[in-house]
Image (cartoon, rainbow, N blue to C red):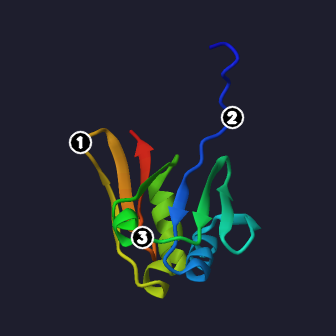
Amino acid sequence: MEHLESIELKTFVPAKDFELSKRFYKDLGFSMNFDDGNLAYFCHNDCSFLLQNYYVKEYADNFMMHLLVKNTDAWWEHIKSTGVIEKYNIRAESPEVKSWKMKDFTLVDPAGVLWRFGENI
């Protein structure tokens, strides 16, 4: 197993409306480093994912992303200041301490993907 070095793990996030989702993630603060019309590569610091121009409701409704951050309160304030909740008419719940020893909050993207922003406490 000594030669089995992993470099990166990315997931493919579904988009019901690809153009709308690209705008949403840019407004959220992610950088789009690639876009070929069917796949877009988004990054924030060392974290990244691939947004795909593909949507199946049952898949999106059961899809969850978890972004571990240093400060959930700072992220929450950033998200509120961008106006994405109102602009994209999405659901979001403010940060709270959970029983699993994390402070986190949720945000649902325009395709129904649930994002959890979590901070270790």
Q: Neighbour class for label 3 at 10 Å: few (<14), some, many (≥20)?
A: few
**Quadrant location of the C terminus?**
top left
Q: Which x, y percent locates residue 80?
A: 47, 74
Query: Which image quarter: residue 116?
Result: bottom left
Q: Residue placed at 37% from the left, 59% from the top?
A: 105
Q: Is residue 53 left or right of residue 84?
A: right
Number of numbered labels in the structure image: 3
**Residue 64 to residue 98: above or below:** below
Q: Judge from the rendering whether residue 91 lies leftward or rightward of residue 51; answer left or right.
A: left
- The amino acid pointed to by label 1 is Ser
Using the image, determine if residue 80 lies above or below residue 119.
below
User: Closer to the camera, 114 or 28?
Assistant: 114
What percent of the width, then of the height, locates residue 44? 65, 56
The residue indicated by pointer 3 is: 56
Dot 2, crowdedness within 10 Å: few (<14), some or many (≥20)? few
Q: Nearer the viewer, mark 2 or mark 1?
A: 2
Q: Mark 3 and mark 1 in contact (Cβ < 8 Å)?
A: no
Q: Nearer the viewer, mark 1 or mark 3?
A: 3
- Per the image, label 1 sits on a secondary structure element best described as loop
Secondary structure at badge 2 equals loop
Q: Mark 2 belongs to which amino acid?
A: Ile
Distance from disc 1 to disc 3, alpha carbons, whole Å, reads 32 Å
Q: Residue lying farthest left?
A: 99
* Direction from residue 22 to residue 15 in the image, left or right: left
The location of residue 35, given as percent across then percent down, is 73, 69
The residue at which mark 2 appears reads as: 7
Give the side of residue 97 with respect to residue 85, left or right: left
The residue where tag 1 is placed is 99
Counting residues from the start of the chain, the first of labels 1 and 3 encountered is 3
Which tag, 2 or 1, sits closer to the chain's start? 2
In three-dimensional space, the C-alpha distance between marks 2 and 3, rounded to whole angstroms, equals: 29 Å
Q: What is the number of the mark on residue 45?
A: none
